[in-house]
Amino acid sequence: MSWRNKTVTIWEHDCDSCFSLGPHSDGHHDYDLYWCPTGNLGMATFVARFGNDGEQYISGGLAVIVDTNPILTEAQLRYELVRQRI
Ligand SMILES: [Zn+2]
């Protein structure tokens, strides 16, 4: 996908469906943020990868992440900005 190819990412990520939302640091980890249109159970999901190993990511859907995870909330904010441009 074109978004992913234009955006610098830090870690390897093996999901071809994900759109990159760019890197993000919280002072503890460096994350690559993604929006995955398929996600789990067919629901859109936000992903924050912090390492190259398969399990080194956190993810959550819209209903889960509001006010509960600042990293995924950042991903959601970027997604809203990107979506306004397409
Ligand atoms: Zn994905």
Image: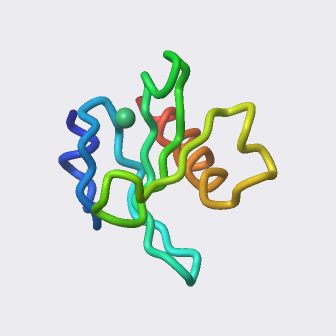
Judge from the rendering whether residue 35 lies leftward or rightward of residue 81; answer left or right: left
Q: Is residue 76 above or below residue 70?
A: above
- Look at 28% across and 41% down and name the residue there: 3
Where residue 69 appears, as percent x and y from the top left, is: 71, 56
Q: Quadrant of ligand 1?
A: top left
- Look at 32% across and 52% down and name the residue there: 54
Where residue 7 appears, as percent x and y from the top left, is: 27, 55
Q: Image quarter for residue 22?
A: bottom left
- Look at 61% across and 40% down and name the residue there: 60
Tell me the quadrant of the picture where the N terminus can be found: top left
Judge from the rendering whether residue 13 lies leftward or rightward of residue 37; answer left or right: left
Q: Image quarter for residue 61?
A: top right
Where residue 30 appears, as percent x and y from the top left, is: 44, 73
Q: Is residue 20 above or below residue 56?
A: above
Q: Is residue 40 above or below residue 9?
A: above
Colouring method of the image: rainbow
- Look at 77% across and 44% down and name the residue there: 66
Tell me the quadrant of the picture where the C terminus can be found: top left
Extreme-right residue of the structure: 67
Q: Nearer the viewer, residue 39 or 32?
A: 39
